[in-house]
Image: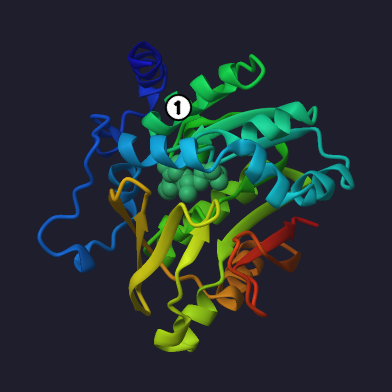
Amino acid sequence: AREIKEAVQESTSVNGDPESSEDFDVHQDFGENPLEVRTTDHYTEEYVTGFVDKWDELIDWKRRAESEGTFFVEQLKKRGVRKVLDVATGTGFHSVRLIEEGFETVSADGSAEMLAKAFENGIKSGGHILRVVNADWRWLNRDVHGEYDAIVCLGNSFTHLFSERDRRKALAEFYAMLKHDGVLILDQRNYDSILDEGFSSKHTYYYCGEEVSAVPEHVDDGLARFRYTFPDGSQYHLNMYPLRKNYMRRLMREVGFQHVETFGDFQETYREAEPDFFIHVAEKR
Ligand code: SAM
């Protein structure tokens, strides 16, 4: 595993951005005042080895695939998509799924550690060799080449961008990498219900039965800090920007997407009338 990590780091060092170099730490570092950590660049330090390994062990891919169903794949197939760029590869779940469905897939992520894990997972799940590229969304066109029929940004990833400038820049980069009739599929947690309904909506989200819990520990207009607790008692945090659904839709339209359709979906075992996730399907023409 170490060798793969080093190889991925080496092969992706074209990025040349000193802020994107990582040391594959197992501990998260939010400093003395975690609620002040509201910067886009912090994401590479949040997905540390311990966290992602535990997540992948517990939330097994078979179960995830069952709960997610065929929604994304159907959206892509009905548009005749062949080439897909997964911009938030993470540990590779969606990339592997797409390859298995026959899509020509390139797997990008701003974290070399995540890509190393994804590469390993690809081999373990059916011997797939993922085409990985280490690229931050804000400079995507610099590091990823070619044009794509579709871009997917899934697993509540866009929430890691903390300024509107970064969000606009990332969406503009996505737009530019799509063919004239391309489609962007981007999902997000339903933050509206957490922001609007106040404390009562800060319920615990359970993944994989009751084994992993996620609690919004702090929420304000500029930060949603979630605490993840695993069966062995270990805890990790993610600091995220609470994207409102209509704000996200507006941004996509302003960047140039002509048609944005938003779906509500239930991805967790805890169910309410309101969906926990929204999925935006944004078409370029
Ligand atoms: N799609 C995967 C899934 O659902 O399992 C991974 C989702 S994970 C929550 C979010 C991923 O987005 C992380 O791997 C992180 O490194 C990546 N990410 C966050 N901000 C990014 C940025 N600005 N540029 C590139 N990747 C970014």
Q: Is residue 213 above or below residue 242?
A: above
Q: At which x and y percent is residue 3?
A: 35, 11
* Amino acid, disc 1: Lys
Label 1 CA crowd tier, 10 Å (few <14, some 14–19, many 20+): many
Q: Is mark 1 within 8 Å of ligand 1?
A: no
Reply above or below: 197 against 12: below
The residue lying at 62 percent from left, 22 percent from top is: 125
Left or right relative to 277: residue 228 = left
Q: Position of residue 139 (x, y in %)?
A: 45, 42
User: With respect to residue 116, does 268 lie above or below?
Assistant: below
Q: Is residue 275 left or right of 170 when viewed as pictured?
A: right
Q: Secondary structure at mark 1?
A: helix
Q: Is residue 110 visible?
A: yes
Say which residue appears at 46% left-offset and 52% top-offset: 211
Tell which residue pokes out farthest to the left in this image: 32
Asked whether residue 146 is in view, the answer is no
The image quadrant of residue 62 is top right
Which residue position holds label 1? 117
Q: Is residue 2 left or right of residue 35?
A: right
Return the residue nearer the eye: 282 or 165: 282
The residue under the point 60% across, 16% down is 129
The quarter of the picture where residue 256 lies is bottom right
In this rendered view, identify the residue nearer to me: 285 or 268: 268
Q: As rendered, which of 193 and 77 lies closer to the eye?
A: 193
Q: Quadrant of the N terminus?
A: top left
Quadrant for the C terminus in the image? bottom right
